[in-house]
């Protein structure tokens, strides 16, 4: 079995947590950020667990993460 290549775009956007969950950040972080509330802007900084319907696709893209 040959080695698998990591999709570098996915590796930059998604991380695996200590318990094995795939974590993601929300979109919309940089554009039109001035008009958002401070509370909304802080919410963009934290990573959230990915929905289970997308986990399989991402695990194929980052097999060694």
Image (tube, rainbow, N blue to C red):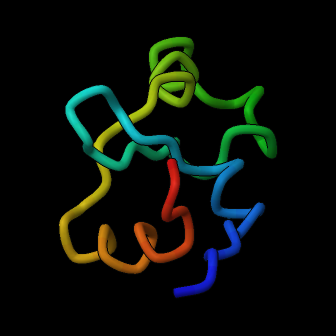
* Position of 38 relative to 60 (above/below): above
* Position of 55 relative to 57 (above/below): above
Position of residue 24 in the picture relative to residue 4 (left or right):
left
Image coords of residue 15 (percent x, y): 50, 41
At x 41%, y 67%, the residue is 59
User: Within the image, what quadrant is residue 49 found in?
Assistant: top left
Q: How many marks?
A: 0
Image coords of residue 17 (percent x, y): 35, 32
* Position of 56 relative to 43 (above/below): below
58 and 48: which is toward the camera: 58
Image coords of residue 18 (percent x, y): 30, 26
Image coords of residue 37 (percent x, y): 55, 20
34 and 58: which is toward the camera: 58
* Position of 42 relative to 28 (above/below): above
46 and 43: which is toward the camera: 46
At x 64%, y 62%, the residue is 10
At x 54%, y 30%, the residue is 44
26 and 1: which is toward the camera: 1
Position of residue 34 in the picture relative to residue 43 (left or right):
right
Q: Residue furthest bottom?
A: 1
User: Within the image, what quadrant is residue 61 found in?
Assistant: bottom right
Position of residue 51 in the picture relative to residue 36 (left or right):
left
Position of residue 63 in the picture relative to residue 2 (left or right):
left
Q: Residue furthest front?
A: 1
At x 61%, y 84%, the residue is 2
């Amino acid at each position: 079995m040959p080695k698998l290549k990591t999709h570098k775009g996915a590796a930059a956007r998604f991380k695996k947590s200590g318990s094995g969950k795939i974590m993601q950040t929300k979109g919309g972080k940089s554009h039109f950020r001035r008009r958002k509330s401070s509370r909304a802007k802080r919410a963009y900084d934290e990573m959230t667990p990915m929905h289970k319907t997308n986990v399989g696709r991402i695990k194929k893209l980052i097999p060694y993460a």
